[in-house]
Amino acid sequence: FNRVKKIAVLHQIKRLVSAAQDKSFTLTTGKPAYMRAYKGVISYKKPDNTVDEYDLVYVLPPVTCGQWILHAICNEIDRYYTGSSCMVPYGEKLPAAKAYFYSHYAYFRDVLLRQPSVLQGKNLLFYTHPRDLWFSDDELTYLFRYADTILCMCSLFAGELENKGTSNTTVALTGADKDFFHSHERGTGVVGFCSAYYPRKNGDTLMQIVKLMPDVGFRL
């Protein structure tokens, strides 16, 4: 118990020291406190000659997440990718590569702070949807300037980012390729939804749709 208490006290001291350093940084530079962490990134200089181990590196969710939809997305992309590639869980050191695909945009922050050398390659961030993170929206907007492309899943999210000052966005509609999927007359089959049903998925609205269409079969 005493050891646990000592560790908790040490963490508290570190937080207080960090907060004091942030305050001092802001007072002396006039810049947001979060920029103190980016000093190594700002001063990083790309070397003239680099040797890339891979054409593309996928940054996966951490090992503790198990298999997730983001793993499946990376696997599906890699099925059609013809260059050399590898997959590395978030939290592990990344090898040198021509490009990095971050399966979740927030992973880019910690990778960049630990390994500014990823700026030697292209950094592609997959922006699935906005959510509360462990750092501020202002820092996120600042972080995005170091990425080459922010891949948004819909134009709504791209517009929201652009309104906040992010200009390097593009929209990639997954599963909506008009050259692959064609409209057709529906038969008597059922409508299927494969999803988690927490608040963001708006399950109440989904149930209203089901009730309004009693002649249609649904599989949730």
Image (tube, rainbow, N blue to C red):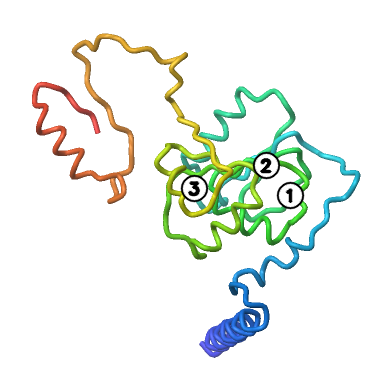
In the picture shown, does residue 59 fall above or below 85?
below
Q: Quadrant of residue 82?
A: top right
Q: Position of residue 124 (x, y in %)?
A: 62, 41
Regarding mark 3 in the picture, which secondary structure is present there? helix
Give the label on residue 28, or none.
none
Q: Position of residue 90 (x, y in %)?
A: 61, 51
Give the label on residue 100, or none.
2
Q: Between tags 1 and 3, which lies in front?
A: 3
Q: Position of residue 159 (x, y in %)?
A: 44, 44
Q: Earlier in the sequence, mark 1 or mark 3?
A: 1
Q: In this view of the protein, which residue sits in the foreground, 48 or 160? A: 160
> Residue at 62% across / 29% down in the picture?
78
- Residue at mark 1 to residue at mark 2: CA–CA distance: 8 Å
Q: Which residue is mark 1?
A: 118
Q: In this view of the protein, which residue sits in the foreground, 13 or 131? A: 131
Regarding mark 1 in the picture, which secondary structure is present there? helix
* Crowd rating for badge 3 (residues with CA inside 10 Å; few <14, some 14–19, many 20+): some
Judged left or right of residue 75, residue 55 is right
Mark 1 in CB contact with mark 2 (< 8 angstroms): yes
Q: Quadrant of residue 45?
A: bottom right
> Residue at 60% across / 86% down in the picture?
20
Residue type marked 1:
Val
Residue type marked 3:
Glu
- Residue at mark 1 to residue at mark 3: CA–CA distance: 24 Å
Q: Which residue is mark 3?
A: 162
> Residue at 53% across / 36% down in the picture?
170
Q: Between tags 2 and 3, which lies in front?
A: 3
Residue type marked 2:
Tyr
Q: In this view of the protein, which residue sits in the foreground, 89 or 41? A: 41
* Crowd rating for badge 1 (residues with CA inside 10 Å; few <14, some 14–19, many 20+): many
Q: Position of residue 210 (x, y in %)?
A: 15, 32
